Image (cartoon, grey):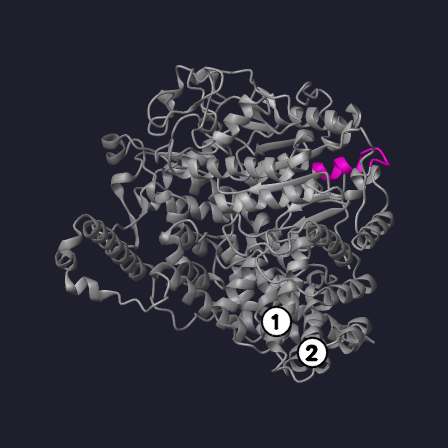
Amino acid sequence: MVDHDDDDCERMTPSRRAILGAAGALFAWSFVPKFAYAAAGSRDPRFLLVILRGALDGLSAVPPIGDPDYAGLREGIALAKDGPEAALPLDGFFYLHPAMPNLARLYKQGQATIVHAAATGYRERSHFDGQDVLESGQPGAGATQTGWLNCLIANLPAGEGISRKGVLGVGVVPPLVVRGDAPVLGWAPPRMARAGSDLTMRLADLYGQRDPGLARALAQAIETEGLAQRRGMAGEQKGGGGPDTADGMRRIAEGAAALVGADDGPRIAALAFEGWDTHANEGGAKGRLANLLGGLDGAFAAFEQGLGPVWKDTVVMVATEFGRTAAVNGTTGTDHGTGTVAFLVGGGVKGGRIVADWPGLKPEQLYQNRDLKPTTDIRAVAKGVVSELFGVSGPVLAETVFPETGDLKPLQGLVV
Amino acid sequence: MAETGELKAGAIALQRFGLGPKPGQGEAARAQVRDRLLAEIAVGSVAQPEGVTFSGAAEIGKALYDFEDQEKREREARRVSVAQAPQGAQVANAAPQSQMASAPKPANEPALPYRTYRDEVKARVDLALAAETGFGERLVMFWSNHFCIGATKSNMSRIMAGAYEREAIRPHVFGRFEDMLIAAESHPAMLDFLDNRQSVGPNSPAGRRRGRGLNENLAREILELHTLGVSGGYAQADVTNLARIITGWTVVGREGVLGFPGSFAFNAGLHEPGVTPLLGRRYDQPGKAQGIAALTDLARHPATARFIAMKLARHFVADAPPRALVDRLALTFRQSGGDLPTVYRALIEDDAAWRAPASKIRSPQEFLLASYRALDRKPDFGQIIGPAGVMGQPFWQPSGPNGYADDNAAWASAEGLKTRVDVAAGWGRQAAGSVADPRVLSEDVLGPLLSPETKQAVARAESKPQAIALLLMSPEFQRR
């Protein structure tokens, strides 16, 4: 039976056989009640990547109200610094969308950094290629079926424990950023009764004899389920909204926090929220985008609460494939653009700051006279965070995790 | 041995190109599969679902507008009744009797858009369960996903999702690609889903009067997802120009000024005037003809042929299909002018498509249909939408205009597989009363594909429900 067999991480990872062995080891783990991994006294960091699919309008999430050209471009959806639905103040130039009070609080507490006028190296405007670049870490789309988080844990120094714990991908369909040869744990908010463990064990046995690809996936699912049970997540409510609703975002965030917060859980996770493609009737202080931003803001609270004692060592990074047009389009929405915002949130963030080399919003300052011009590369942000959190070396990041980014220095000082 | 190999290839083909055998059908169906598939192509049509409430989009649109008007009246009546509680008698008079009676709603029935969606999903699944090989239905699923709309976007896309497939996809599955392309892009469901009904030419009469403008959502996805593909050689200017060309392609409003409410209309008052270039050509046709000409040229573009050939081969054969196969399909597409039966024939007759190992995991919808066929069950709507939803592929509800994924990396994930186990366990319990002997069923449904290991696992199961679940979750049933 066939499994995918690309890829760019291949030479840095153990052989396929060793991986299968690792999956087997994971499988055995689910019967071990508890592990304590972290060496006493050392930091035991957590990293969660939240992908916003559909291209977040950064100029609405973090409006540059201090820019004299902002209000004119945004007729019908511009936010104001005064009035009943005022945006939340950040530094007097940038404001925060009023649907995000938690983020404003975390910013004030020094636990949130906002990166503005940011983008990956991708300069076209296809959602799907843009997400591919954001998640694969490759310079172009379609290059690989391996995500950069998978690549990252495959390249952490041996004995770290983090690699062995795998990377968590939330969702029935895991995000590309976690896919690859290193162990991937899967979890999604429960929507129906789970099968009995006897059936699962028999299938694991059958796959072991017949189908290595299915055997590996099932072993990883069993491992996560064991972890979820130990975290008391078995009796959760079923049903609820999807990843494009505030309710769905909160449930996804709670689940991810419970698993990543566990002593014996994965240290790295990725999840995706959907619905950000606001071509029409985007709304201002209230409306479609406001509802989504409120959902994201609720997810920040769920992360903070769910991660509890390890929140102080946590960095949540929020990124989207690209931004939207600087001007409103003909239908009170915005079309696909380029520069946008990224968020870093968590007790591990050296926060209370806005990282932005502001390009301005005059026509000639826009990218192709159309979009917010990107001046900070999201990959430099990601490289900075993971190098400080996990001690990954510059060359590994520049050549393997984010290939061909030798000229793109990791942004320093993002982490406490 | 040669004969065994032939039967095995036939068994895989039934799953690869169809929806898998029904009980008692296995042995006969596996013989001469290729001839059966070619005969289906020769027939050249797919059936239309039966028992749906509305015949087409126009009728649905009218019903939707009436429904929305009614809801508005009821909302206002409630507001009035709250404000003027003692004068309840006046509230009843607020809506004329005839309108109140027009949509009697049984208790616990969902509202009209979801009710219509429900009936359309059920009718479509009934058709797939009744089909002989299911090849035609698989093609419908493929094209419906290629030109997908999302039912969660609005009341209109929800209520029209089924009609869209019936009107834009099914009539053209065995026809020409350009006809399907034009039918899809001009369907009210698509014009609503990708916002083109709101797009206004900046220099059109309406644009000059109201200061409204373009929405390039549909134009971009036509180029990126429906025709050329993302690397098909177009630029941002082409996206904007195509958006200009198709301004005015809209949906008739509730007043019915331009036609029957809810149907397609070309509104000249929204159309951007003048000659517009696209991919190096000039389009100077008047009105709607400009968009038709542009779509026709896009359908015949070599990049479109390559893109469709790749998607077909990836869907039916392998995540990374043989390059030579893709080349042959693309050439056939071009030489035949996008005649789809000719392309399918080339696919079915190609040994590369026939001999490839069963590497692809069935999509959740394929798994659902194949399971209900194998178990000979007639599911109700809840038994369809529940499992399809939890497995990540509810009908007509992809999370974006690129449709559902079509590779193992998406569907054979840890959580995806575990969810399938949960679903299969439920089906095992439901079917335990009707399946006489799971061992016999395994032989019947899998035939020469049944491995000794799966055979043993089914035979040793602790219960009949478990045995059925093991059959459905076996590698032989999961992969095609």
User: From this viewpoint, is residue A370 visible?
Assistant: yes
Which residue does the numbered mark 2 point to in the structure image?
B464
Amino acid of disc 1: Trp
Amino acid of disc 2: Lys
Q: Specify the subunit that label 2 lies on.
A: B
Residue nearest the viewer, comparing B68 with B232:
B68
At a point 66% along the width and 79% down the height, the residue shown is B26
Residue nearest the viewer, comparing A286 with B290:
A286
Mark 1–mark 2 distance (CA, rounded to whole Å): 11 Å
Residue A149, magenta (yes or no): yes
Which residue does the numbered mark 1 point to in the structure image?
B427
At a point 36% along the width and 38% down the height, the residue shown is A281
Vertical position of residue A199 compared to residue B249: above or below? below
Measuring from the top left, give residue A275's x and y in whole percent. 48, 42
**Disc 2 packing (10 Å; few <14; some 14–19; many ≥20):** many
Measuring from the top left, give residue A152's x and y in whole percent. 75, 35
| Extent of the magenta region | A148-160
Q: Specify the subunit that label 1 lies on.
A: B
